[in-house]
Image (cartoon, coloured by chain):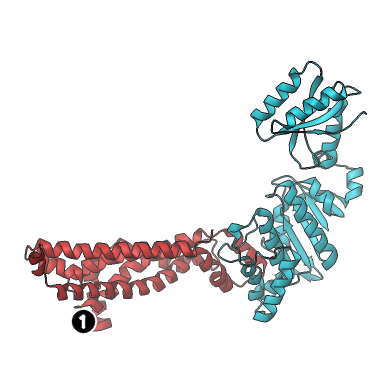
Chain colours: A red, B cyan
């Protein structure tokens, strides 16, 4: 068994794990910021919203729907010119980031929108009755009150992100996806695929655990 | 203190929400302290709203904030500095009697305590008017009383005009000097509370008075008229219906006593529904029977005594 395990290129495996974590964390941060921005725009410009604006709502909604419905593997290819323009390359972990972020942010944006809709209308009304400006309502009422939904939504998004980083691996992003595909699948070395999968599973479980803890901590209901 | 009463759907909430323009009127004007609110732009309206406190039926507290932080919200909106904010919060917490609960979250509070936070929050910026939108409708009778007396003391000590809407006549009776009766969006009757109570003109007003404490007392008096002249009136109550049934059966089975069940009424003491009985018999037999019931985890309370 141990001899068998020695056939694995461990330094390479850990390097790939690092690349996967790098892609997940960086794209997670950007997805979070961009998703909150999109979600807020959707919520605020929707009918009856604080900044009701049908034109902006229509634009954002169609952007979100378009990028949510394109399969990720196709999105990566479609975005190659954009990535080239932005980073000058299309190989490597960093080059995978734009596609991962653009694929995930609209998804998280919808989750943010749902979370904001669940904030009690009465609380918003109370803030209006106190003389709050619309931005004060957004910053002091809407976002803090929606925090548990934003946090649990981010946990779900993070896990979807890991799937995307693995898929990006197939077109040369590096990371555990690349190892599992190039060294595992294509050379028929099932052990490599298996180990890469186990590491991905551990990362997923860890993120779910941390996400649940954060959600529980911010939820004072 | 001015009260507005009406049934659900009469337009009470709309009326009170019009006052701070949470609801925009299609025509007409709203004047508070000489300012016509409908003529203000958004910024001026926000400034004016700070002079109008509001409390709600469902409290509308931010559950992500502690008691102190909830009260701080209106002060943060006006950019009050931190020191002033803290001293004001301490003052308000004391005023509404929530000392020691500063860092509790709304989810850890009872309904009455939540409404106290709501009141403190509404008063934070020293408003001239306090609007109460069914402020006690989600509370039990005892808590309602405590909130009402808090409102009344605020009205007297701070000299704030309080406008409250409710569907309970007892609330109006306890607090208000003037009352308006609202029906299908129109004020059908208005005047001082004593005058409206003594000489109600509209049918709907009479209905509300009938449902009030006075009305209940009249109904209770009619119930008691059914009792035989010399009978002792008692309230029987127990923790659960089975226990009540069991003890009632025991009492009725006692051949040395004549027991008549008159009906149920709400006790003035603890606002619980109780069974009203008329009991006849010698004092010793009666006392023995009552003592037996008390030892059986039921309560019996003698309302009158003919000895």
| Side of B125 where A209 appears, left or right | left
Task: Identify the residue at horizontal 24%, vertical 65% (top origin).
Answer: A200
**Corner quadrant of residue B84:** bottom right
Q: Give residue B144's position: percent from left, percent from top.
A: 74, 51
Q: Quadrant of residue A84?
A: bottom left
Which quadrant would the C terminus of chain A be assigned to in this image? bottom right
Residue A174: % across, % down? 19, 74
Residue B214 vertical position relative to residue B67 in the rendered view, above or below: above
Q: In this rendering, is residue B194 above or below B47?
A: above
Location of mark 1 (residue): A89
Q: Position of residue A213 (x, y in %)?
A: 42, 63
SS at mark 1 in the image: loop
Q: In the current view of this chain or complex, which residue is farthest to the bottom? A: A88
Q: Quadrant of residue B152?
A: bottom right
B27, B154: nearer the viewer: B154
Q: Say whether residue A19 is visible.
A: yes
Is A199 placed left or right of B3 in the picture?
Answer: left
Q: Nearer the viewer, residue B206 or B217?
A: B217
Which quadrant is the N terminus of chain A positioned in?
Answer: bottom left
Image point (71%, 26%), residue name: B247
- Residue drawn at point x = 84 percent, y = 54 percent: B176
Q: Position of residue A210 (x, y in %)?
A: 38, 65
> Is residue B226 visible to us here?
no
Left or right of B51 in this view: A50: left
């Amino acid at each position: 068994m141990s001899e068998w395990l020695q056939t694995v290129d461990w330094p390479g495996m850990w390097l790939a794990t690092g690349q996967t974590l790098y892609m997940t964390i960086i794209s997670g941060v950007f997805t979070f910021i961009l998703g909150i921005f999109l979600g807020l725009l959707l919520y605020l410009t929707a009918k009856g919203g604080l900044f009701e604006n049908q034109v902006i709502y229509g634009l954002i909604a169609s952007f979100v729907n378009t990028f949510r419905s394109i399969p990720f593997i196709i999105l990566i290819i479609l975005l190659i010119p954009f990535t080239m323009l932005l980073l000058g390359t299309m190989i490597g972990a960093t080059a995978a980031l734009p596609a991962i972020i653009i694929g995930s942010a609209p998804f998280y944006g919808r989750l943010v929108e749902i979370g904001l809709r669940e904030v009690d209308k009465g609380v918003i009304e109370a803030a209006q009755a106190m003389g709050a400006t619309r931005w004060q309502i957004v910053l002091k009422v809407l976002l803090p009150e929606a925090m548990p939904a934003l946090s649990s939504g981010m946990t779900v998004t993070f896990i979807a992100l890991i799937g995307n980083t693995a898929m990006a691996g197939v077109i040369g992003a590096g990371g555990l996806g690349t190892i599992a595909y190039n060294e595992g699948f294509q050379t028929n070395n099932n052990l490599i695929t298996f180990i890469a999968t186990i590491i991905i599973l551990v990362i997923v479980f860890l993120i779910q655990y941390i996400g649940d803890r954060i959600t529980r901590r911010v939820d004072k209901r | 203190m001015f009260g507005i009463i009406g049934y659900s759907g009469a337009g009470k909430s709309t009326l009170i929400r019009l006052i701070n323009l949470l609801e925009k009127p299609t025509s007409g004007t709203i004047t508070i302290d000489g300012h016509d609110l409908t003529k203000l732009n958004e910024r001026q309206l926000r400034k004016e709203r700070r002079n109008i406190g509001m409390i709600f039926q469902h409290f509308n507290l931010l559950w992500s904030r502690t008691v102190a932080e909830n009260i701080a919200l209106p002060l943060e909106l006006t950019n009050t500095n931190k020191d002033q904010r803290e001293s004001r919060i301490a003052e308000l917490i004391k005023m509404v009697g929530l000392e020691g609960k500063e860092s509790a979250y709304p989810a850890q509070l009872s309904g009455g305590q939540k409404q106290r936070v709501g009141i403190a929050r509404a008063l934070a910026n020293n408003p001239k008017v306090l609007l109460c939108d069914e402020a006690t409708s989600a509370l039990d009778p005892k808590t309602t009383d405590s909130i009402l007396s808090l409102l009344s003391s605020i009205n007297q000590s701070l000299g704030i005009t309080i406008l409250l809407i409710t569907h309970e006549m007892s609330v109006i009776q306890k607090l208000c000097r003037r009352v308006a009766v609202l029906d299908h969006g129109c004020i059908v009757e208005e005047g001082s509370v004593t005058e409206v109570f003594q000489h109600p003109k509209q049918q709907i007003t009479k209905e509300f008075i009938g449902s009030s404490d006075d009305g209940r007392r009249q109904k209770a008096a009619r119930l008691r008229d059914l009792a035989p002249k010399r009978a002792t009136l008692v309230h029987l109550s127990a923790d659960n219906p089975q226990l009540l049934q069991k003890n009632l059966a025991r009492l009725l089975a006692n051949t040395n006593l004549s027991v008549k069940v008159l009906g149920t009424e709400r006790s003035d003491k603890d606002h619980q529904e109780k069974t009203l009985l008329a009991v006849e018999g010698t004092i010793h037999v009666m006392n023995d029977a009552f003592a037996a019931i008390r030892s059986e985890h039921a309560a019996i309370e003698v309302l009158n005594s003919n000895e």
